[in-house]
Image (cartoon, rainbow, N blue to C red):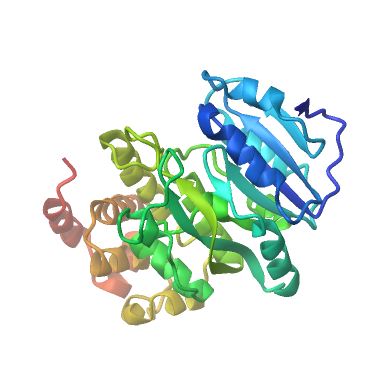
Amino acid sequence: MQHLSEAHKFQKKVNIILSSYNHGSSLSETLNSVAEQSLADFECVVIDDCSTDNSIDVIDAFNDPRFFFKSTGRNPRCCETWNEIINRFPTDSYFAMAHSDDLWQPHKLQKQEKFLNDNTEYAATFSDVTAISQTGEIFPSGQHSLTEIFRQPNRTRHEWLRHFFLHGNCLCHPSVMVRTELMQKLGGYRYNFTQLTDFDIWVRIAKSGNIFVDQEKLTSFRVRENDGNSSTPTRDNEARHRYETMEILRDFSNNLSKDDLKEIFPDCLGLLDTKDFIPDFSLCMIALTLKTTRPHQFFALSTIHHLFRQPGLADLIWDNFNFSKRELAMLTAKISTI
């Protein structure tokens, strides 16, 4: 595979990043599933995050002029490199993400490109997913949690944001195609996330435009043995997931108007129709009203403590919510942070 040069100019309507890390055993199959797409006029950058298996050998042996190789240079540095490449794609193009152990149906790109061409009000399109084993066998419906998690109905933009706030991620990263202009405007992926890098960008996309989920299973997601997936609920992954969920909740009200929040939470209008609009505090109270998960509780508690440190804001909160330091102390005692 040819190395990507700094001088290369991307000019295709559809551009792909294929992220690679230690999936040498399945990488060749993944590369072929991209190469054999019915929409053949694309370019793909394979970004390897310093694999220690035979991935580089597989990449070197793959010969297709539409594919380019780039190394992150050091591990982990994938998000920075993804963003660097996305910023080189044409503004009016579409961006699709592939992972080195997953597969696409042959018409995946063609169907998604047509949808975005025909539906300019949509920012991104995803698909339902087939869960496959490490050896490629299909998990029957209901046999693996991923067969249900990624099976999502279509929702309005505000309904998606409500679902994200209350329930977290339910969209499959390698199933996405998104407008490059929006990815560039949003600043791409954020480096500080490990477990929820994709979920963070889905929330920010939904604040800007509509999301569509194709009900056809256009993507196959490989479930690796011995907890090999980054999304596997190991102790470390679960701890990171809880913390990163808190960080996403902390930013949730950014770029949302009062009308947006009322559309997202129509059952909490009493927390939003106040004399003074204090979105961060309203969102904390909504989290405590609608959810009792630890990330939601910790988000609410830490945010309220932060708000009370801002001059004059404690008085505003009291005037609008009858919530004072006394209530904060009671809440702190109720929610154990240990």
Q: Is residue 311 visible?
A: no
Residue found 79% across the figure and 40% down from its top: 66
Quarter of the image where the C terminus is located: top left
In the image, 24 versus 242, the foreground residue is 24
Residue found 34% across the figure and 39% down from its top: 240
Q: Is residue 98 above or below residue 129?
A: above
In the image, 332 versus 235, the foreground residue is 235
Is 129 positioned to the left or the right of 283 in the image? right
Is 284 positioned to the left or the right of 189 in the image? left
Q: Is residue 292 above or below residue 225?
A: below
Quarter of the image where the N terminus is located: top right
The image shows residue 150 at horizontal and vertical percentages of: 43, 60
Where, by quadrant of the figure, is residue 70 drawn? top right
Where, by quadrant of the figure, is residue 182 drawn? bottom right
The image shows residue 189 at horizontal and vertical percentages of: 58, 44
Residue found 55% across the figure and 64% down from its top: 206
Q: How many marks?
A: 0
Q: Is residue 64 visible?
A: yes
In the image, 170 versus 58, the foreground residue is 58
The image shows residue 171 at horizontal and vertical percentages of: 47, 58
Q: Is residue 81 above or below residue 51?
A: below
The image shows residue 326 at horizontal and vertical percentages of: 16, 60
Residue found 72% across the figure and 72% down from its top: 120
Where, by quadrant of the figure, is residue 296 drawn? bottom left
